[in-house]
């Protein structure tokens, strides 16, 4: 659990500042579950430059509660939380100073979104909250007011959690979460999980990830782990101390996250040899007469595939449909072993490339259209799908045919601006598994939106 906060102060000498406004959002890693926003009477003068910056003046604070009147609420809303702030050292120091004046030893773990951003979103021109959120396309209102800045920090922190593919933030949080130190029953853990699409992480008592999985229904899938009687499931059940999850909004992001994060985190109960998730591929070659031939074969990483498949039968099923869609020759597609004309020629669904009745130039034009459609070779595009919330969209960036990563946006501006898009996405490795996942998903889901990008 996190307490994401922002504080406005009077300014002045070090450790003599007073709080003028505070906003705290209790955040469970997915949504805000509680909030506290209040002006505070600092009982001291506000520096003129601070008044100009925040718009908060002494007249506004005459009837505001003094710090001791809100102290109990602050303690309650930050209980068992890691305090998160943009420049956390400052906000945490101010809070501790105010509590020290009351004779109360206020102590919390802290996380700084400046430091996290420098690690997870490198090479930004500035890491000030205003400039960073602007660069990331995060809308901010009431800048330099506690609530406006706290809301922006919540949005930024949510993005940072998504970018943390090695799950360092979550694993550290589990180590200090008291509820996970009480050896909770598996039923209690299950009760806190949602029926949503995403990736889930099973942790041991040290916070270490021992298993990563994906599902269209996280609660039901984890329930299977907790009720199965096979040897692997029993071992997982004995070591489980917590289950965390990331909502993804759709199956494609879940598949990509699962593939990447298993490779990065290497959980002990994920199959150690899970290197590839496909067995067959579609290849092309030019025959001695100049015609492009298609052939299904076992996947070979040394050869450039058009697209890949999990089974040979799914590959053949795809190719029969593709031959029909692009009016191709079954013989030149390795679907008819005849030495003469193919079957489709006899029913007038082949233009005669099998007997050289159609020219290679004409025939190859249609084959190249198939290759272009299903290989996304050299493509610059964004795949847009459902997000984690109603107003949100997921985005996958492909540059020069290379998968760059995924992210989430709320505004069309974030998609159309390539610089913002590259900052928003979580960088991911482009490998044969990710290519297979994307290509296979595109074949099965025609509703996904493809937006071409101009060459940068």
Image (spheres, helix red, strand yellow):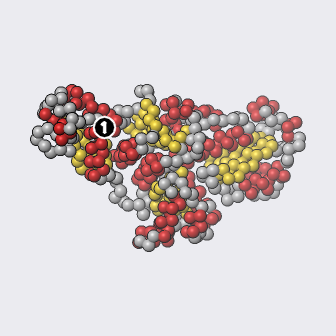
Percent across and percent down for residue 187 are 57, 68
In this view, 231 is above or below 171: below
Residue visible at 30% across and 42% down? 321
Residue furthest left as drawn = 339
Q: Residues within 10 Å of mark 1 (few under 14, many from 20)?
A: few
Q: Helix, strand, or loop for circle 1? A: helix
The quarter of the rendered structure image containing the N terminus is bottom right
Q: Residue 59 vs residue 384: left or right?
A: right
Percent across and percent down for residue 362 are 22, 27
- The residue carrying mark 1 is 325
Percent across and percent down for residue 231 are 41, 72
Percent across and percent down for residue 308 are 31, 46
Residue visible at 33% across and 38% down? 374
Residue 154, image quadrant:
top right
Q: Residue 288 vs residue 297: left or right?
A: left
Residue visible at 32% across and 34% down? 372
């Amino acid at each position: 659990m996190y307490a994401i906060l922002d504080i406005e102060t009077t300014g002045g000498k070090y450790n003599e500042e007073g709080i003028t406004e505070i906003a705290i959002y209790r955040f469970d890693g997915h949504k805000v579950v509680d909030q506290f926003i209040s002006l505070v009477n600092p009982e001291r003068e506000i520096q003129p430059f601070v008044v100009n910056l925040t718009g908060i003046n002494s007249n506004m604070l005459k009837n505001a509660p003094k710090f001791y009147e809100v102290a109990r609420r602050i303690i309650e809303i930050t209980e068992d939380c890691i305090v998160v702030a943009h420049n956390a050292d400052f906000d945490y120091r101010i809070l501790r100073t105010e509590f020290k004046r009351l004779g109360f030893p206020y102590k919390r773990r802290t996380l700084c979104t400046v430091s996290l951003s420098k690690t997870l979103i490198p090479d930004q021109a500035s890491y000030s909250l205003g400039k960073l959120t602007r660069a990331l396309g995060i809308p901010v209102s009431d800048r330099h007011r506690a609530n406006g800045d706290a809301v922006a920090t919540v949005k930024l922190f949510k993005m940072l959690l998504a970018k943390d593919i090695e799950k360092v933030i979550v694993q550290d949080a589990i180590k200090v979460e008291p509820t996970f130190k009480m050896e909770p029953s598996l039923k209690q853990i299950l009760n806190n999980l949602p029926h949503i699409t995403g990736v889930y992480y099973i942790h041991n008592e040290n916070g270490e990830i021992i298993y990563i999985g994906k599902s269209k229904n996280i609660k039901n899938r984890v329930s299977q782990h907790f009720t199965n009687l096979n040897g692997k499931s029993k071992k997982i059940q004995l070591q489980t101390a917590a289950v965390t999850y990331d909502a993804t909004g759709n199956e494609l992001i879940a598949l990509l996250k699962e593939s990447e994060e298993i490779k990065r985190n290497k959980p002990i109960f994920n199959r150690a040899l899970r290197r590839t998730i496909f067995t067959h591929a579609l290849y092309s070659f030019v025959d001695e007469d100049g015609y492009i031939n298609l052939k299904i074969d076992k996947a070979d990483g040394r050869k450039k595939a058009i697209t890949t498949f999990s089974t040979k039968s799914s590959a053949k099923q795809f190719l029969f449909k593709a031959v029909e869609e692009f009016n191709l020759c079954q013989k030149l597609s390795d679907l008819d072993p005849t030495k003469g004309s193919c079957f489709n020629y006899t029913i007038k669904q082949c233009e005669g490339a099998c007997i050289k009745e159609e020219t290679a130039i004409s025939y190859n034009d249609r084959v190249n259209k198939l290759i272009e459609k299903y290989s996304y070779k050299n493509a610059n595009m964004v795949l847009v799908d459902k997000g984690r919330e109603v107003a949100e969209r997921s985005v996958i960036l492909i540059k020069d045919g290379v998968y760059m990563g995924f992210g989430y946006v709320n505004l069309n501006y974030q998609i159309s601006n390539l610089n913002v898009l590259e900052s928003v996405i979580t960088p991911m490795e482009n490998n044969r598994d990710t290519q297979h996942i994307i290509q296979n998903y595109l074949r099965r889901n025609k509703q996904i939106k493809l937006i071409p990008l101009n060459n940068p």
